[in-house]
Image (tube, rainbow, N blue to C red):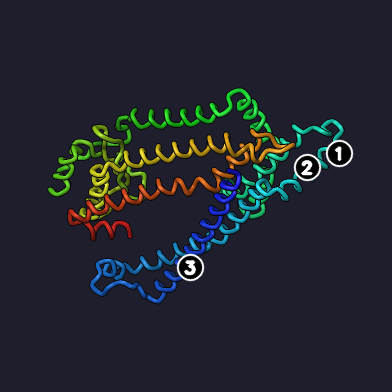
Amino acid sequence: MKNVFIIAVWSSFILGMLTLLNEFSFDRQLEFSLSKQLYGLPANSKTLELISSDKKYINSQLKALEKRTNRIPSEIFKHFCVLGSSLLFLNLIFRKSLQTVISSSIDILPKFRHSVRMKELLFISLISTFLLASVFGSKIFANIFSGESLTLAAILFYTFLGLFVLPTFYMILKKLFKVYSSKLIIACYMAYFVKAISDFVSLEDVNLENMKKVNISEFSKNVRDYLIERGLQNKVYSEKLKKSQSINAALVGWGSYERIEIYGDYQNLTSNEFEAILMHEIGHSEFCSLIKKILTLFFLKTIEMVVVLQIYASISNKFSDSLITKNGSFIVLFLIYFLFINRWLLMFHKMVSQVSEFSADTVAKSHGYGKELSKSTL
């Protein structure tokens, strides 16, 4: 099982690198094609007609591509940092080297000399700090600080995290695992499921202080009929105060609690463009998108729980040694799994979300709103 976990880490790294390199190559090709007006679309394509009619569209796409392309080098660097931090624990040579440095540093202090517990605490905290810093870097400060202040804030934060927060958190977890063992993992996931189910079944009514009911008579017969068909004719609401500059609609709730909430001043759109957005949201009702996404998430979280239990029961012992206990090993392995491997499992939830969006788009298109829906997203 030890080798299986290591293979999973390397596979995650390779898949991530291939994905980023493929994205970089695709973005550069698309950027070149757009700049040369080589769209690769048939002359009678409706998509080509829409692109050609909006001169700002190409410029906006080029800016978006530039932003995506500039992000990729930092993502590649982050991948290498996460892999390097993981190998400090997974690779025996790197681990022994780091343990030697930590032991030598601790032995300088007479009070903690020969303290295996302190050496383990420092080792686990150091690896955990490296992993968290590799994944999140200075993103959490980006909206507050900039330039040199941003770097200094990040350094101070991770220093505080590694010296005080993580050691305290680890000692608490170690005590809990000593008492409850794997039951603690099951309890955490059960709490997540109970909270998620509670949020799902106890739906709140619409906030009538901020929202008002919309008279569907202002919509076309096509939309009215579809709303009636889905039982939503009295469940369309819009903001009383048009706070949002962007215009959007959302299907909220499920079953008999479903409703559509409209945000922004939809009068700024043509009636057909807005009705296309509305049709899209009603389409989510027809395909039960919310329920499918929630059931998928529950299924994936159940698999995740089984994997985490397997890591605790069968793998963490394989990485323990004279300095690192099973519980300490599990903490690091869980972080590596959660930050590096688990996203490939949650990828399936994103796929279900994309399929739901595509299905809702086909509803709008089947009712004759394909062109208007495309315009509203340009």
Residue in the picture at 46% in, 31% down: 192
Q: Does label 2 or label 3 sit earlier along the sequence?
A: 3
Q: Which residue is mark 2?
A: 102
Q: Quadrant of residue 127?
A: top right
User: How many numbered circles are shown?
Assistant: 3
Asked if residue 160 shows in the view, the reply is: no
Q: Which residue is mark 1?
A: 108
Residue 245 locus on image (x, y percent): 36, 50
Residue in the picture at 32% in, 41% down: 292
Residue 158 locus on image (x, y percent): 66, 43
Taking depth in this image into account, of 209 and 274 the one nearest to the observer is 274
Q: Is residue 153 left or right of residue 188?
A: right
Classify mark 2: residues with Cα within 10 Å, few (<14), some (14-19) or many (20+): some
363 versus 111 height, above or below: below
In the rendered image, the quadrant that contains the N terminus is top right
Q: Which label number is shown at residue 25?
A: 3
Q: Does label 2 or label 1 sit earlier along the sequence?
A: 2
Residue 246 locus on image (x, y percent): 35, 50
Q: Are marks 3 and 1 in contact (CB under 8 Å)?
A: no
In the rendered image, the quadrant that contains the C terminus is bottom left
The mark lying in front, picked from 2 and 3, is 2
Q: Secondary structure at mark 1?
A: loop
What amino acid type should be assigned to the residue bearing mark 2? Answer: Ile
Asked if residue 8 shows in the view, the reply is: yes
Taking depth in this image into account, of 268 and 7 the one nearest to the observer is 7
